[in-house]
Image (cartoon, rainbow, N blue to C red):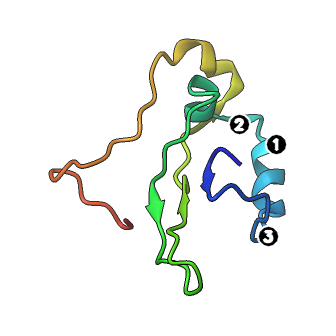
Amino acid sequence: ALDRYPPSHAHINTNAFSTLVDELSLLDVWRCLHENESQFTWCGNPDSNTGELHYSRIDLALADYKLLEKITTCEILKDRPDIALDHR
């Protein structure tokens, strides 16, 4: 729920992806280093009824759990005109 605004537990079918991540012993590095923080990498169109914007963190930095102790930082880069993004 931290990775969506408004908070939601509804997911499009992510079971296959979650299973693969688990089978490969991968961790979401950004979430591990920012346990209680919310930052988003995608903003949807306003809700047609409420006008409320929907946000999600759809980009993941995955790594093998054995590497986690070697990773000291993982940041979401925003407002960088020198980096082309495929979504906003």
Residue with the mark numbered 3: 13
Would residue 80 be found to the left or right of residue 64 on screen? left
Q: For mark 3, does the 10 Å Cα neighbourhood hold few (<14), some (14 to 19), or many (20 or more) residues?
A: few
Residue type indicated by callout 2: Leu
Up-down: is 70 above or below 6? above
Labels 1 and 3: the sequence-earlier one: 3
**Image location of residue 1, percent across then percent down:** 71, 49
**Image location of residue 42, percent across then percent down:** 46, 61
Quarter the C terminus occupies: bottom left
Up-down: is 30 above or below 51? above
Mark 1 lies on a secondary structure that is helix
Nearer to us in this view, 10 or 82: 10
Instruction: Give the residue drawn at x 45%, y 29%.
Output: 74
Q: In the image, which is nearer the foreground, mark 1 or mark 3?
A: 3
Q: For mark 2, does the 10 Å Cα neighbourhood hold few (<14), some (14 to 19), or many (20 or more) residues?
A: some
Residue with the mark numbered 2: 26
